[in-house]
Image (cartoon, helix red, strand yellow):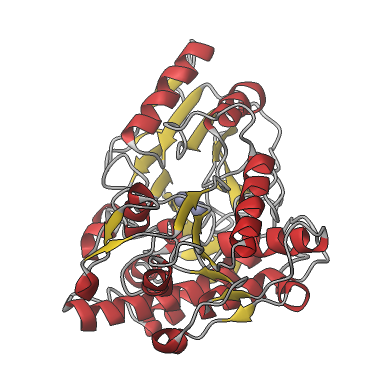
């Protein structure tokens, strides 16, 4: 029997990590770190990983899918790590950046358990990495009973759906996927169904799509907000993740400029954002993308923002600051620079991605223009006079698209719901049950092996 074990600690968007086992073969899907927890609490259930783990397969380079990889590699040095070339090129600098962040937190917050791993641990893990191309089957070794195939997932550069083949049956693990075009990424390349089992992300299960408010609508709304800010002499801050959203927004702004929709204006990105953007340029022909020949750095020419400028920075009309972190975590550049925007009515802070409600970004969105926000440390409660708005430029499939995709393309007889908060998972559980009464729908409990495939009758 092939088993599936959910290695996350709870049903939520946490430390994504799942274990597939058949006989002697065991393979992990993703090794993520929980974005909203600290220390060892943020790791997956590491002690449930078998000692003789064969391989770890990564869906894409976001922290909630790769953040715990160095720890797993350290405990299982013989396990090979498979990913696409773009994921490898993005993951290595991101993991080193995580070491830097944890080292800073040790110093600033007195977290003596940090860093959970070191630059050396990351380097040792990277030695075990193997690149796997799209659409070509691979195994951890020739005797393994589990075979895998990557299909492009359309979420960020290098992201994949992972097909799992065993016992002449097929399962599909979505990782994070997108079914519509973004500004830069293409929609996911759906492999031909039916599949026996689908292991599916449920990020947007609690968010109904509003008719007429699609990607193109939010792109136009965002460009209008930028134009209006410039017309009244303001500057724009967009808090973004360094990988994914940064490159999507650079592309959107560049094409809007060429089309005359916004005036030509300096766009500042952070150092990590620049490093990630260089990978997007270098890997542009190796991973599916729109505008395959478009190189973001030489053509869009974003400026690199040096955080040392912050103490003496004076915001200038018509400048765009595209800075991380997306959640505006304290001490990050977007958190620090935001104070300069708060008192200025003609400036704007424009969000383009998910903001966790209890994060500084979530609190700022809730406060809105005219409200007050507790910005921590010396500042205390600050009045927010600048414009604050949100535009849903998501990198995840909407729940309506995903439901249609499951029932019309993938057609599984068993669905395992993961990567979503409880209310998001519940919506999918009922919606799928209603549209396909015979389908088995499971919310896999943490740490408990369950059959991957439906029992043959
Ligand atoms: Zn992701
Ligand atoms: Zn994710």
Which residue is rendered at x = 46% and y = 84% of the image? 313
Which residue is rendered at x = 66% and y = 48% of the image? 219
Whether 138 is drawn above or below 420: the answer is below
Question: Could you tell me residue 206's position as x and y percent?
Answer: 42, 31
- In the picture, which quadrant includes the N terminus? top left
Which residue is rendered at x = 27% and y = 73% of the image? 116
Question: Could you tell me residue 73's position as x and y percent?
Answer: 39, 69
* Quadrant assignment, res 52: bottom left
* Quadrant assignment, res 112: bottom left
Q: Nearer the viewer, residue 88 or 208?
A: 208
Q: Nearer the viewer, residue 424 or 197?
A: 424
Which residue is rendered at x = 23% and y = 67% of the image? 376
Residue 240: tell me if it is visible: no
Asked if residue 29 lies left or right of residue 195, the reply is left
Whether 190 is drawn above or below 35: the answer is above
- Count of all numbered marks drawn on residues in the image: 0
Q: Nearer the viewer, residue 272 or 237?
A: 237
Question: Could you tell me residue 379's position as x and y percent?
Answer: 24, 72
Whether 402 is drawn above or below 268: the answer is above
Asked if residue 66 lies left or right of residue 169, the reply is left
């Amino acid at each position: 029997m092939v088993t599936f074990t959910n290695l996350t600690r709870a049903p939520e968007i946490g430390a994504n990590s799942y274990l597939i086992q058949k006989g002697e073969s065991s393979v992990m899907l993703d090794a993520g770190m929980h974005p909203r927890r600290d220390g060892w609490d943020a790791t997956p259930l590491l002690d449930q990983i078998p000692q003789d783990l064969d391989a770890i397969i990564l869906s894409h380079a976001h922290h909630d899918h790769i953040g715990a990889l160095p720890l797993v590699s350290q405990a299982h040095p013989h396990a090979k790590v498979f990913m696409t070339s773009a994921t490898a090129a993005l993951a290595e600098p991101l993991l080193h950046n995580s070491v830097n962040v944890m080292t800073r937190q040790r110093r600033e917050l007195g977290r003596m358990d940090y860093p959970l791993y070191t630059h050396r641990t990351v380097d040792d893990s990277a030695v075990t990495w193997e690149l796997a191309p799209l659409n070509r089957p691979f195994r951890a070794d020739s005797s393994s009973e589990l075979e895998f195939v990557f299909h492009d997932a359309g979420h960020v550069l290098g992201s994949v759906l992972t097909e799992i083949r065993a016992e002449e049956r097929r399962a599909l693990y979505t990782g994070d996927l997108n079914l519509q075009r973004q500004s830069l990424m293409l929609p996911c390349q759906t492999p031909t169904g039916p599949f026996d089992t689908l292991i599916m992300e449920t990020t947007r299960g609690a968010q109904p799509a509003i008719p007429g408010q699609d990607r193109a609508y939010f792109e136009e709304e965002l460009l209008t907000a930028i134009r209006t800010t410039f017309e009244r002499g303001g500057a724009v801050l967009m808090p973004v993740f360094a990988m994914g959203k940064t490159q999507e927004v650079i592309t959107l702004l560049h094409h809007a400029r060429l089309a005359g929709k916004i005036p030509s204006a300096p766009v500042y990105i952070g150092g990590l954002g620049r490093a990630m953007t260089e990978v997007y340029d270098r890997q542009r022909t190796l991973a599916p993308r729109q505008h395959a020949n478009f190189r973001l750095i030489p053509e869009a020419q974003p400026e690199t923002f040096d955080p040392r400028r912050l103490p003496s920075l004076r915001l200038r009309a018509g400048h765009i600051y595209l800075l991380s972190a997306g959640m505006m975590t304290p001490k990050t550049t977007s958190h620090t620079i935001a104070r300069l925007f708060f008192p200025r009515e003609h400036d704007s802070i424009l969000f383009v991605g998910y903001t966790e409600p209890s994060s500084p970004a979530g609190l700022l969105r809730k406060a809105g223009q005219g409200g007050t926000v507790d910005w921590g440390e010396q500042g205390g409660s600050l009045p927010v006079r600048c414009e604050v708005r949100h535009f849903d430029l998501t990198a995840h499939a909407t729940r309506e698209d995903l439901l249609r995709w499951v029932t019309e393309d993938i057609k599984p007889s068993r669905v395992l719901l993961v990567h979503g908060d409880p209310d998001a998972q519940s919506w999918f559980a009922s919606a799928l049950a209603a549209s396909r009464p015979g389908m088995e729908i499971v919310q896999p409990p943490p740490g408990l092996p369950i059959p991957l495939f439906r029992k043959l009758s």
